[in-house]
Image: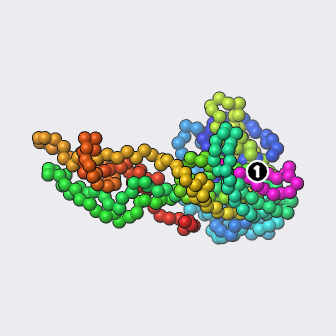
Amino acid sequence: MSFRIKTYIYISALLTFFSCIEPIDIKEINYENYLVVEANLTDQLKKHTIKLSRSFMLNDSVPKYESNANVRIIDNNENTYTFSEVEEGLYESDDIFKAELDNTYTLHINTSDGNEYSSTPEKISGINEIDDITIGKSITAENIEGLKINVISNTEDVNSLYYRYEYDETYKIVAPYWSQFELVPVSREFPFSVTFEVKDYQAKECYKTQKSNTIIQTETTGLDKNNVNFTIRFLEKNDFIISHRYSILVKQYIQSANAYRYFKTLKKLSVSQGAFTQNQPGFIPGNITNNKTSDNRVLGFFEITSYSEKRFFFNYLDMYPNESIDYISDCDFIAPQLTAGLAPPLVSPLINIIDKGDYLYYKINPEPSESAPGLYYLVPKICGDCRVLGSNIKPSFWID
């Protein structure tokens, strides 16, 4: 999970991933250089990753990554899983493996400054697969009309009580004024001239993927059964990202009670309420400690979770027939002249605009006028090239 929120003091670095039922003892401290650990081992058979960084102040623009550390996970059967640094601060397991039910796992970190860190032994708390993703029309308390996406999970496992979610959403973008032709200058000196060329790429349909950037949790402790029917995403009716076709990949993690409390507390501290709220950040004790000294504390929680995911698609017209959403940008046409001026030095407004790259050819101007004197209509690039907003490579999972 990559969820960094800049708040006061070192909490900025920690808010990349976590949250928590009961109150946690939060201690106010001044800024210090703490190790920040992002580690979640799941029951997916894969190479797992662990991120290490350092706490940083609000006015710092980038996190400080922790390099050259020795990272390993050891289970209760004395199996050791080693990790290697694949990029600055990012450590990947050397082999594929997964968290096994009933096994316990402990994280060990040795940093280049000589400090040693370890977590408490952790294990999978419960298992529950996502059964379905549903969508329905809804109106919020603020009278905002839109669509709510719910995740449904049903289980008889009495230990599956605490849930954390992430999602990847992908949406289709259609450039409303794309043309397969482009205007290319031939002569930039008088007499000016341009020619048409066929584009060797398509930029009419693109795709954009973005990840959730907040902590999303629910619990079933107050329910008769551990069944989840939880709204993971609300999309306003006129949100541009649902203009055509939309897909969401919902990721479900079943947490332990301690992990749930930790993430929940972190979420409360990460809510942006302005600079002078009473909700001030402080040190949130996790399950990772420094084995050499209590003064050099560590931020983070080593989490073991069962994992489930499910993908869902829908079209806007399926939900709102005969309706549409305005494009994300204004698309006013211009038609600049090829040659302007009555005496030297003559200039070419059309070629000057083409060279700047802010406008693209769309079509012939059939009736030049005083407001549109040129022979060719141009549109803002964002309206004629969807790559401004996304990628023209269709995702492998995409289904039209």
158 w.r.t. 272: above or below: below
Q: Quadrant of the N terminus?
A: bottom right
Q: Quadrant of residue 340?
A: top left
48 w.r.t. 161: above or below: below
Instruction: Say whether residue 350 is visible.
Output: no
Q: Residue at x 50, y 65 (%)?
A: 394
Q: Which residues are magenta?
A: 219-234
Judged left or right of residue 106, residue 70 is: left
Judged left or right of residue 253, residue 93 is: left
The residue beneath circle 1 is: 218
Task: Measuring from the top left, give residue 303's x and y in whole percent.
Answer: 73, 56
Task: Measuring from the top left, give residue 223's x and y in whole percent.
Answer: 86, 52
Q: Quadrant of the C terminus?
A: bottom right
Q: Is residue 171 found inside the magenta-colored segment of the image?
A: no
Judged left or right of residue 355, residue 43 is: right
Q: Residue furthest top?
A: 276
What scheme was used to colour the molecule? rainbow
Structural crowding at the residue carrying mark 1, measured as other residues with C-alpha within 10 Å and reported as few (<14), some (14–19) or many (≥20): some
Amino acid residing under circle 1: Thr
Task: Measuring from the top left, give residue 251's x and y in whole percent.
Answer: 68, 59
Q: Residue at x 25, y 47 (%)?
A: 368
Instruction: Say whether residue 308 is visible.
Output: yes
